[in-house]
Image (cartoon, rainbow, N blue to C red):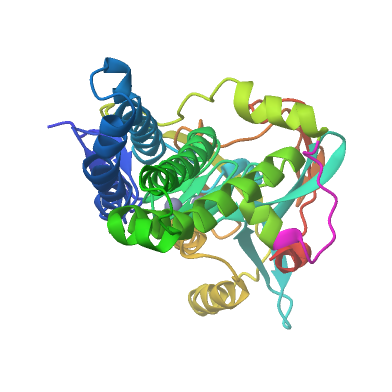
């Protein structure tokens, strides 16, 4: 029976309702978060709002304003929590193979003059964003070049676009598709704290006014619930209010939390900063990118496209059996790359067994590379007699274009 995408999902996500909702692996924390939100709301409604109702407008429907206020804000908080936690944060779908067009064919010459072809993926490449070269890294797990601002979440095990951070409270990555909801969640939670705090303070004030001459302490002793709620909300406000302020700063400068922590020391220029008002417009009024994953889609049987690449082999004629063995060892020593490329290399070696010594052929099954984010680029490069001038036509962030810099040596410095 055909399986659906979410049933064969390689990330650590949890799916419910047949792949309609996607959560992070730590989604168990969401009920805990809801408890932290609803507990003060319930106590406030029972011990403070009812009394305020009775004090102010006992026989009037408008007296319910204290309830309505707290319920309304709570509903907003919970809706934004749901929208943040249960949807695709902007996951870049994995490739099933390394991008074939990015493979480098290097021939290393050993001491006795034999040549060994190896297959490598350049670790980084440069992408132009608003006219500035930005280095993007190759993700070994997802087998793709991460688009700018994309990062691999180690908790969810996915590459997420405009990765902000992984939030343990909402059990989900915060990325391009849920950042706005996350901010609204945090800021409405801060509003809820302010509301409960100020209404509890109001009730203390009411108690003081009712019995003229009552001290604050007496009034507080009279309504211990108000005091507890005020303490709880005061502490919570440090957290959610501080977070709201921090994200307001990040939004105004168009940074992600990840970039802020990562690049602060580097003194890097922020190429995404387009002025405070434009940054706010971008976050709050731009269209949410559609998800690149259809979790409920059936996995299609794909017909592999075989592309045969030939590289000229100039090894010695004799002792081929030994040579092949040595070559294989050499190949493995040369490879400073991930398992996936190793697998490709092994396949490469297997192919070699059956063919004429002077020619090596690699069969690479090219599966769909729709998830391979790249922008139109033109590259002309002659490598081992093979000229490449292919134009890639994938889409990326608007207004950016790709420039190639294939240097494996520069690879690690980007880390
Ligand atoms: Zn990744
Ligand atoms: Zn995550």
Q: Is residue 254 left or right of residue 292?
A: right
**Count of number-bearing discs:** 0
Can you give x and y, in whole percent of width and height, for residue 351 in the image?
A: 45, 55
Can you give x and y, in whole percent of width and height, for residue 62 in the image?
A: 32, 18
Can residue 164 be seen from the camera position used here? no
Residue drawn at 67 percent across, 61 percent down: 261
Q: Compare residues 11 and 286 and report the one nearer the observer.
A: 286
Q: Quadrant of residue 83?
A: top left
Name of the residue lying farthest toward the left: 1
Q: Compare residues 392 and 114 and report the one nearer the observer.
A: 392
Q: Quadrant of residue 128?
A: top right
Q: Which quadrant of the rendered structure holds the C terminus?
A: bottom right
Q: Is residue 389 above or below residue 334?
A: above
Q: Is residue 279 above or below residue 321?
A: above
Q: Which quadrant of the rendered structure holds the N terminus?
A: top left
Q: What span is in magenta?
A: 262-273
In the image, is residue 347 part of the stretch drawn in magenta? no
- Overall secondary structure of the magenta section: loop
Q: Compare residues 290 and 253 and report the one nearer the observer.
A: 253
Residue drawn at 78 percent across, 47 percent down: 134
Q: Quadrant of residue 137?
A: bottom right
Q: Is residue 366 left or right of residue 220?
A: right
In the image, is residue 270 part of the stretch drawn in magenta? yes
Can you give x and y, in whole percent of width and height, for residue 273 in the image?
A: 80, 38
Name of the residue lying farthest toward the bottom: 111
Residue drawn at 46 percent across, 60 percent down: 235
Can you give x and y, in whole percent of width and height, for residue 315 in the image?
A: 65, 68
């Amino acid at each position: 029976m055909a399986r659906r995408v979410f049933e064969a999902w390689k990330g650590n996500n949890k799916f419910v309702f047949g792949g309609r909702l996607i959560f992070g692996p730590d989604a168990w924390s969401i009920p805990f978060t809801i408890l932290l939100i609803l507990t003060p709301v319930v106590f406030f409604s029972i011990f403070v709002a009812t009394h305020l109702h009775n004090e102010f407008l006992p026989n009037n429907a408008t007296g319910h304003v204290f309830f309505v206020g707290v319920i309304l804000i709570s509903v907003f908080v919970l809706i934004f929590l749901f929208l943040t936690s249960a949807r695709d944060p902007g996951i870049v779908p994995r490739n099933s193979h390394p991008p074939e067009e990015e493979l480098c064919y290097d021939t290393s010459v050993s001491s006795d003059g034999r040549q060994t072809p190896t297959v490598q993926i350049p670790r980084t490449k440069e992408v132009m964003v608003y006219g500035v070269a930005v280095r993007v890294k190759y993700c070994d797990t997802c087998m793709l070049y991460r688009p700018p601002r994309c990062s691999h979440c180690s908790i969810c095990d996915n590459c997420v676009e405009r990765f902000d951070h992984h939030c343990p409270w909402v059990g989900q990555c915060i990325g391009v598709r849920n950042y706005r909801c996350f901010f609204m969640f945090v800021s409405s939670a801060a509003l809820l704290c302010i509301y409960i705090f100020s209404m509890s303070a109001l009730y203390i004030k009411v108690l003081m006014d009712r019995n003229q001459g009552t001290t604050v302490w007496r009034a507080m002793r009279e309504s211990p619930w108000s005091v507890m709620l005020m303490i709880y909300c005061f502490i919570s406000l440090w957290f959610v209010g501080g977070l709201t302020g921090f994200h307001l700063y990040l939004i105004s400068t168009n940074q992600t939390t990840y970039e802020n922590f990562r690049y602060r020391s580097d003194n890097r220029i922020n190429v995404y900063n387009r002025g405070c008002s434009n940054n706010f417009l971008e976050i709050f009024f731009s269209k949410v990118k559609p998800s690149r994953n259809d979790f409920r889609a059936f996995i299609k049987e794909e017909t592999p496209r075989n592309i045969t690449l030939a590289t000229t082999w100039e090894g010695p004629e004799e002792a081929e059996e030994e040579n092949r063995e040595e070559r294989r060892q050499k190949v493995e020593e040369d490879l400073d790359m991930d398992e996936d490329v190793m697998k490709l290399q092994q396949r490469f070696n297997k192919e070699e067994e059956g063919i004429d010594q002077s020619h090596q052929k690699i069969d690479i099954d090219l599966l769909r590379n729709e998830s391979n984010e790249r922008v139109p680029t033109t590259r002309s490069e002659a490598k081992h007699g093979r000229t490449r001038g292919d134009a890639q036509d994938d889409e990326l962030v608007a207004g950016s274009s790709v420039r190639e810099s294939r240097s494996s040596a520069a690879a690690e410095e980007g880390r």
